Image (cartoon, rainbow, N blue to C red):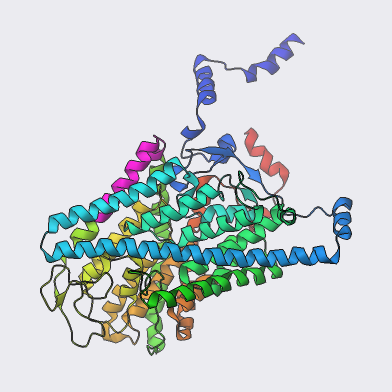
């Protein structure tokens, strides 16, 4: 018996000093020092509440959400005891919350757009003054310094006050709607830092957009409304008890996510389909109507403020701040031979999208190592990216040759205003710098410029190539720093670059406009990276305002998604894996159907 007991005890104790040292080392290792090759879930059963670049910086216990209704006797008695008035009140409050989510999202989106356009606008006007006086070094110092301060303000807020406000926030929303709670993701502090940080980061000219942050902002608004405000100042109204459950909170956050996409692209139907296709795991017909109500309110608010701003009451806002590419007045005609370049764009989009996901995955793992060293390193990383971006945006236009203005151009040429399709920059009178038109402007104006139609001779192919290569580099190194950032706009800029370049190479061999090639290129790369089809198709149709693009847009999206799926998962699934957030798909993989418990348990003992 003694021998048997000793035999049972031996495997539990280290047999050598080296093994004992390994055990002690494993026990003393901090959660932040997880190996990049080992998932957080398998090691500590914890997840990171920080943004993507800060994986492992702050860990919290995973919490699951209960979306199922326990139809026990107590639940049935509670519903039977409610009067008809209380039931109608519950339904009315659901619609009221959906309306308030849309209203507040539209108002905050307008404030963000106004702030970004005016801050960036006055900065660019000051740069024009330095260029006109030929004070190029002073202009570089001013441009770099202002962008440095704007990035610093956004990074300090995210690093010290609300780490969960960095990044896009869409992967966490997707995990929450799947049933995984992410602590501090929808708090009041996160909301405020997300708003201010987005303004600072986008105004600084970084290669990121406000689209992803707007989805997160709208979801925070929805969560705070459903629970009666932040924890410290929560309202104790009696009717709020109806929404004190995970199921109703999930529905209202779904309305928030669709409202955020609508506010970013002014695409109400696209916002609803985005929530259905990309982020929501649970869906009901009643939820469809409420999300559509929220997006309808958002688009009405945005349209009202656009009318006000068009009268000149919004400073430098004008018609900016919203990505809108109106080609309704352009005749779109294509023949069977035009399908060949369309198919090529789809294939290139799928290949580049999967390659972008792969390389970004490696970059984010590198950023993880840097950010684990402390808050100072997070700030230095963000500021280093800001300096590199500013120097490239200011200096690269000097490499472009000045191009003479064509009298047939529909716009003023050249122009030194904040916006415009023909920036004079360092060129003499009657000439413009096509690369400065794309780089020394806001990201939204850059999209409008490269999407512009009937401008086949505006850009030189060398300038488009420089633009494409630069934004490929910036798109890889910018996402993951400690500022609020979105993936939509960087991918649109990259895709539009190679799309327009392909249109220029086709020349007279195609009937499609170069601006339409840019649109198709942006759509293909977004589908190749994010793997969205239906919602993305509707968003681009609402952006372009032209139903004639529907057939070729569908072809491009389907090809790009098919090619991308052959190599790796979507970018949001990659981020979910990096963050250690468990995500349960609606349907199991085919190879899982015949698995037994024994097959899952046996490998662990080998």
Left or right: residue 458 compared with residue 71: left
In the foreground, 390 or 557: 390
What residue lies at 45% left-to-right and 43% top-to-bottom? 54
* Residue 579 seen anywhere in this rendered image of the structure: yes
What residue lies at 45% left-to-right and 66% top-to-bottom? 110
Considering the image in quadrants, where does the N terminus appear?
top right
Left or right: residue 269 compared with residue 133: right
Rendering coords of residue 573 (x, y %): 52, 55
Chain part drawn in magenta? 369-390
In the foreground, 104 or 282: 104
Rendering coords of residue 326 (x, y %): 40, 81
In the foreground, 468 or 12: 468
- Residue 127 painted magenta: no
What residue lies at 34% left-to-right and 76% top-to-bottom? 451
- Residue 371 painted magenta: yes
Quarter assignment of residue 372: top left
* Residue 577 seen anywhere in this rendered image of the structure: no
Left or right: residue 447 compared with residue 239: left
């Amino acid at each position: 018996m003694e021998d048997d007991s000793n035999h049972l005890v031996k495997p539990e104790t280290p047999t050598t000093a080296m093994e004992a040292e390994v055990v002690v080392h494993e026990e003393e290792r901090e959660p932040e020092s997880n190996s990049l090759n080992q998932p957080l879930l398998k090691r500590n059963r914890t997840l990171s509440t920080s943004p993507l670049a800060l994986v492992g910086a702050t860990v919290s216990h995973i919490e699951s959400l209960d979306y199922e209704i326990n139809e026990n006797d107590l639940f049935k008695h509670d519903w039977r005891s409610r009067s008809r008035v209380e039931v109608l009140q519950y339904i009315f409050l659901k619609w009221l919350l959906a309306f308030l989510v849309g209203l507040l999202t539209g108002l905050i989106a307008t404030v963000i757009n106004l702030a970004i356009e005016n801050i960036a606008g006055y900065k660019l006007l000051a740069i024009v003054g330095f260029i006109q006086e030929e004070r190029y070094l002073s202009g570089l110092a001013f441009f770099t310094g202002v962008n440095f301060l704007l990035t610093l303000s956004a990074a300090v807020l995210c690093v010290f006050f609300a780490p969960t406000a960095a990044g896009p926030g869409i992967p966490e929303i997707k995990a929450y709607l799947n049933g995984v709670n992410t602590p501090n993701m929808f708090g009041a502090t996160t909301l405020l830092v997300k708003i201010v940080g987005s303004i600072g980061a986008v105004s600084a000219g970084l290669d990121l957009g406000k689209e992803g942050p707007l989805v997160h902002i709208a979801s925070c608004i929805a969560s705070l409304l459903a629970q009666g405000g932040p924890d410290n100042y929560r309202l104790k109204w009696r009717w709020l008890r109806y929404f004190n459950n995970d199921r109703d909170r999930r529905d209202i956050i779904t309305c928030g996510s669709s409202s955020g996409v609508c506010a970013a692209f002014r695409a109400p139907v696209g916002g609803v389909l985005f929530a259905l296709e990309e982020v929501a795991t649970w869906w009901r017909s009643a939820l469809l109507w409420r999300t559509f109500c929220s997006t309808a309110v958002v688009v009405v608010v945005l349209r009202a403020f656009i009318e006000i701003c068009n009268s000149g009451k919004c400073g430098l806002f004008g018609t900016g701040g919203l990505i809108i590419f109106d080609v309704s007045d352009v005749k779109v005609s294509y023949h069977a031979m035009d399908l060949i370049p369309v198919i090529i764009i789809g294939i290139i989009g799928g290949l580049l999208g999967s390659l972008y996901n792969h390389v970004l995955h490696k970059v984010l793992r590198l950023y993880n190592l840097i950010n684990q060293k402390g808050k100072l390193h997070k700030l230095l990383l963000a500021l280093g990216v800001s300096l590199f971006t500013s120097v490239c945006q200011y200096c690269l236009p000097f490499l472009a040759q000045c191009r003479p203005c064509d009298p047939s151009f529909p716009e003023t040429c050249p122009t030194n205003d904040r916006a415009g399709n023909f920036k004079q920059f360092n060129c003499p009178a009657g000439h413009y710098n096509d690369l400065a038109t794309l780089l020394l402007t806001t990201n939204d104006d850059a999209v409008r410029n490269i999407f512009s139609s009937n401008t086949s001779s505006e850009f030189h192919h060398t300038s488009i190539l420089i633009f494409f290569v630069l934004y490929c580099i910036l798109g890889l190194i910018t996402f993951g720093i400690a500022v609020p950032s979105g993936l939509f706009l960087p991918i649109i800029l990259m895709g539009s670059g190679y799309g327009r370049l392909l249109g220029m190479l086709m020349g007279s061999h195609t009937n499609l406009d170069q601006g339409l090639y840019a649109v198709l290129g942006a759509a293909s790369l977004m589908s190749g990276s994010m793997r969205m089809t239906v919602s993305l198709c509707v968003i681009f149709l609402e952006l372009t305002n032209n139903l004639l693009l529907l057939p070729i847009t569908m072809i491009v999206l389907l090809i790009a998604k098919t090619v991308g799926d052959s190599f790796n998962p979507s970018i949001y699934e990659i981020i979910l894996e990096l963050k250690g957030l468990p995500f349960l798909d609606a349907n199991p993989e085919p190879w899982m159907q015949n698995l037994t418990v024994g097959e899952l348990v046996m490998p662990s003992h080998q």
